[in-house]
Image: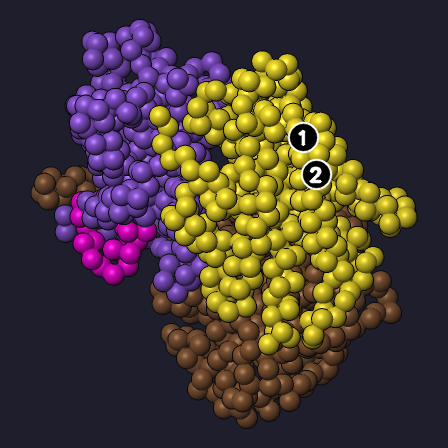
Amino acid sequence: MKKILHHWTTAVLPAAAIALAATVATAQEKPEALSIGVFTFTSGPAAAYGMPGKQAAELMIERINADGGVAGVPIEATYVDEAQGAEGVISEYRSMAEDQDNQVMIAALSSGNCLALAPLAEQLKMPTIAWNCDTHQLLRDSELKYTYRPNGNTLPEFTAFVAYLLERQPDVKRVAIINPDYSFGHDAADIVKTALATFAPDVEIVAELFPKLGASTYQTEISRLSSARPDAIFSNLWGADLENFVRQAGPRGIFQQSQVILALGETVLQRVDLPDGVIVGMLGDGYWLSPDAQSKPDTVAFAEAYHERYGEYPVFPSMKMANALVVMKAAVEKAVEDKNGEWPSRDEIVAALEGMTVETMTGETSLREDNDGIVDQVIGVTTASDSHEFKVIGDMVRYDGEAFMAPVGEEPVEWIKSLEPSFLDTLPAAGSYK
Amino acid sequence: MSRLLVLFAAAAVLALLILPAAMPSSQFIMTIAIAKGFAALGVALLLRGGLISIGHAMYFAIGAYATAFMMKFGVLADLALLLIGSTLVTAVCGLVFGTFLVRFRAIFFAMLNLAVSMVLFALLSKLYGLTGGTDGMRVATPAVFGLELDKAAFDDILYYVCVGLLVAIGLLIRAYLKSPLGYALMSIHTNEIRLEYLGVSAWSVTLIAYTISAALAGLGGAMAALTIGHVLPEYAYWTESGHLVLTAVLGGIGGVAGPFIGSVFLEAVHVLAVDVAADAWNMILGAALLAVIFFLPHGLHGLLEKRAEPRKSQGVVE
Amino acid sequence: MLQSLLPLLIDGLANAALIFFVAVGLTLVFSVLRILNVAHGSFYSIGAYGAATLGLWLVSAGANPWLSYPALLLSAVFVAALFGPAIERTLIRWTYGKGEAVQILVTFGLFLILEDLQRMVFGVQSLYQDTPMTLLGITQIGNVVYLNYQILLIVLAVLVLVGLRLLIKHTRMGRLLAAVVADREVSEAMGIDTDRMYMIAFSIGVFLAALGGALATPTTGVAPGLGAETMVLAFAVAAIGGLGQIEGAAIASVIVATAKVLAVYFVPALDSVAPYLVMLLVLMVRPQGLFGVAETRRV
């Protein structure tokens, strides 16, 4: 049997490889369109986060195409709904990757789906730009060649919140955590707990709750949080879950009782009236009202066009998606340049991504050798605004992206433990980013 | 079996064998269709005994997670061993749960299966440290008889293994259904008391059927885990169990081929529907189910069989 | 001690109230029609969508916010009137006497159709309509703040329970229903219009599910998948209480909700496992449920 199989693989596989090579060769002429797949949630509770991503993709692609496309070629996107579950997502990714016309996948939003797609990207040799999925597990132990994540990972994102909290509330003693029940929530809880234990060892975790992703009611969890009397409540709930939690927790006095930290709070500012002083962030630097973003005419124009079309200003998922497309455009154009104007193959696009530094709509991202992006972290507190009806973020700080990144190859959560409490003194102060 | 039916079956198997060559993109979908077909066959067995389980997807999930765990810990991490091992694990689970579950009939049987499956679903989703929670677990590509292959070559081999197992196990189950045990199972549906008067233990007849049906679902789950490369708690959710019953009934429970016909038919319609009516997929499924129950009580398989062998098939609406 | 038990009790009862509405509808339909309606959860989510949509429309039209209360009830009545008689007269009626497999399959088909129908009508984004909750204000108990609306829910659940009891024991229609439950053939021979009784019972069931959904909207978001999730929970409660037992459903709601609340407080890792674990444990000991009548094998 072994022999037959062996024979089979030696005979059939080279033939298949030749057939594949032939199609790749023809794909190198300049195509009519740069076909990409865009994976995001367009239905279900996660759509509250996924739809802004899709809207931003549509608008960005329109703007890029109006501006001459990518190296003269217009982008054509196919959108895939991640709400159908990993099996459906894998199946669609597979069939799209088998079509040689598709050259880049912008995938995906959910960490779970990224973890499921990453091995497939390697197998199908498909350039994949993770536009969201922050889990540090994605690029940790495997040597992924085809998956890039320009927007950074959970480690800097959540360590930054601990730093900000400890600066504003040095006396915090009792902390509660309420995160969604999957890798993103558990990773963040691990990081927050480890960072607190490192920088403020006398802090006690008084409750740790993981309601399921997509839960519609949080009343029992809110009672539990209340009765634990925490000084601070940390949460990385997101999408409709976050909006649900905020709407249910608000009337029940949670925001008065404790200092609440909503890591993804920027997304609900325009929809729910949060009280003043809630610590909110955007997992990176993707705030359209940040000084950096506002200094870029293109970003201001994008935000206005976005508001015009969708009735809301972009939230940070919109900016993450826009930035992912900026990175993709830069990579393809660099690949074209490397080939002296000829159209690149998938492998050449991947090669161009390696080690790139790209100016994004809201700052800059540099791709490290492990394909992870180094992005600054912006954090602040909710404040009333003179120019907008909704709350904006004030007292901002912009932490240097590199500060919280574990060196390549090091176990990220272990790395936090190697830091000294005095490390916090080296960081810029709250309110320093104006 | 009439000559016509043999002809149908042979043509179908032949079509399965040449399909990947003719339509490479269909191979992944067909592997999944066969995997789910095995689970639906398990459900169909129980339906022949008049037992409806709305929790059977748990055995599909157990098979899939067994494969995932064996790959994770490198135990029996070879294609044949994985399939056999996962099927055995599932069969043992079926036997253990079955000793208790098969005492019940009708609505109670359906409910208890649902209860067990929901406990399993909730545990798979909540035990983050062990099962990866709602993210599920990655399933790496195993070796085939010691030979390390890349995923594409492995998928080819897996497909033909699935088709081979479909024929082999299909014949075995057919033999089982034609055996005294198989007829005893059918009489659980029609007249259980008479069966006991004949000195046959209804409990052991149903337990055997239940264990076989669990094993079939487990084998399907293992196949799905290997081809998808990822397992999720959703495999055990109650709507998945509903889909399995739907697949069995749509295909027809009168013969072994029925559930596979139903499964292949559904996957094919799904592929077509994704483009034209992605938002109405459940609606199409539901309408198809109602149409089959109202107009085709013997399922698609019954449609074939009626041509070949009128008045011999078994349906759900009896 | 009391300080720490009180929040548990209130959370448990508030949760129980919401599950009770939908579970008692399921159990009522089963007791009269002998059908386990797998699509029951869909009426819950349709009621929720209806209430949220109507409420949001009232708010945007600038209506008096107190009108959002009748809007909740109106949504439930509307859903019951629209779906109850129509579905019972067609699909459900066809399955009488056809065996559980067919009944479960037909209602599962209905469930699938209703799931997509909701996506088409109400879209796939989450809806929020919390006006009724904010209007009623809050009460502080210990150091935990509760919504008065949660307490209102508990009162309403008790009213529905008492109302159902009165309806069945003390009205003509209730006695007719009870007669049909006891023996359909004899009732028919006595001149009771059993078809009509079935339709009424089914519609009341739909109404209760939709009412549960409508009353839940002020404190929950409404999104796709709500129906499927509610279905199993209602199912667990109905099974624990004993299918067809109204008081059983009430007590089982409290048991399931308490189990869930206890899990959130003490073993958060098991919060979503708890209801099903209780269901399994109860059914293993008493398959007919706590208050059900034994019937293990058909003769």
Write the start and end of the magenta stretch as one range.
Answer: B65-83
As for residue A131 lying within the magenta part, the answer is no
Q: To which quarter of the image does residue B314 belong?
A: top left
Subunit under mark 2: C
Neighbour class for label 2 at 10 Å: few (<14), some, many (≥20)? few
The residue under label 1 is: C174
The residue under label 2 is: C166
Rendered view: C263 above or below C68: below
Residue A182 x, y percent position in the rendering: 48, 60
- Say which chain is brown: A
Along the line of sight, which residue is nearer the eye, B287 or A350? B287
Rendered view: C6 above or below A334: below
Q: Secondary structure at mark 2?
A: helix
Neighbour class for label 1 at 10 Å: few (<14), some, many (≥20)? some
Subunit under mark 1: C
Along the line of sight, which residue is nearer the eye, A336 or C128? C128
- A36 sits to left or right of B202: right
Q: What distance separates the C-alpha of mark 2 from that of mark 1? A: 8 Å
Main SS category, magenta section: helix
Residue A399 in view in this figure:
no
- A186 sits to left or right of B215: right
> What color does chain B have in the rendering?
purple
Between discs 2 and 1, the one toward the N terminus: 2
User: In the rendered structure, which amino acid carries the disc numbered 2?
Assistant: Leu
As for residue B80 lying within the magenta part, the answer is yes
> What color does chain C have in the rendering?
yellow
Residue A235 x, y percent position in the rendering: 60, 69
